[in-house]
Image (tube, rainbow, N blue to C red):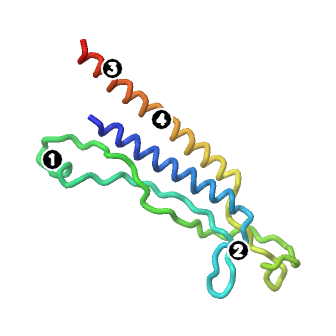
Amino acid sequence: MFQSMNITASALTTQRLRMDVISSNMANADTTRATFENGEWQPYKRKTVMLAPKSQGFSSHLSMAMGTKEATGSGVTVSAIREDETQGALMYDPEHPDANDEGYVEMSNVDPLRETIDLMSATRSYEGNVTVFNANKAMMMRALQIGKS
C-alpha cells in the first residue's frame, strides 16, 4: 500500500541531492584551488550524480522467481557522485597566483549554462514527484472516506 509513496520519496531524495550538487558546482565555478594533488593546486572539477534503480530485498526476488509476484520498481538511489575529468579552460593571466610558467591559469570545468539546464531538469523532476506523492495521498484519504460510509 505504501510502496508507491516509498518510490516517490526515493525520487524526491535523489532529485534534492542532484540540486545540492548542482548548487555546489555553481558556487565553485570560479575556484582555481580546490584540491592539492601531486604537489600543486587543482581547479574545482564539476560533479555529477549517478542514479540507479533501488535494489529490492531478497523476499521480492524470491517471489518474482516463484511467479507469485510481478516485477515492479522499488525506487531510485544514488549510485555515485563522480567528478568530470575534462580540463577546464585556460585563461591567460600571468599575475594570477595559480598561473603556470607560460602565464595560463586552468579554470574550473563548470559550465553555468549546463548547470542551469541540469537544475531546471532536477527541479521539474522534483515537482513531478511531489504531484505524484500528493495524488497517492489523496487516493489513500479517499479510500479511508469510503470505509467510513
The image shows residue 4 at horizontal and vertical percentages of: 33, 37
Q: CA distance from mark 4 to mark 1?
A: 30 Å
Name the residue beneath numbered marker 4.
Answer: 130
Cα distance in 3D space between marks 3 and 4: 18 Å
Residue placed most toward the observer, 13 or 70: 13
Position of 8 with respect to 30 (left or right) is: left
Residue at the disc numbered 1:
63
Going 30% across and 39% down the picture, which residue do you hit? 3
Q: Which residue is mark 2?
A: 33
Q: Residues within 10 Å of mark 3 (few under 14, many from 20)?
A: few
Question: Which circle's residue, 2 or 3, is located before the other in the chain?
Answer: 2
Question: Which of the two labelled residues, at mark 3 and mark 1, occupies the earlier sequence position?
Answer: 1
List x then y, in percent, for residue 32: 73, 71
Q: Which residue is mark 3?
A: 142
Q: Which quadrant of the rendered structure holds the C terminus? A: top left
Nearer-N-terminus badge (4/2) = 2
| Residue in the picture at 47% in, 35% down | 130
Helix, strand or loop at label 1? It is helix
**Residue found 17% across the figure and 41% down from its top:** 69
For badge 4, the amino acid type reads Val
Mark 4 crowd level (few <14, some 14–19, many ≥20, 10 Å Cα): some
- Give the crowd class for mark 1: few <14, some 14-19, many >=20 residues within 10 Å: few
Q: Where residue 98 sits in the image (x, y, percent)?
A: 78, 78
Q: Secondary structure at mark 2?
A: loop
Labels 3, 1: front one: 3
4 or 1: mark nearer the eye: 4
* Quadrant in which residue 24 is drawn: bottom right
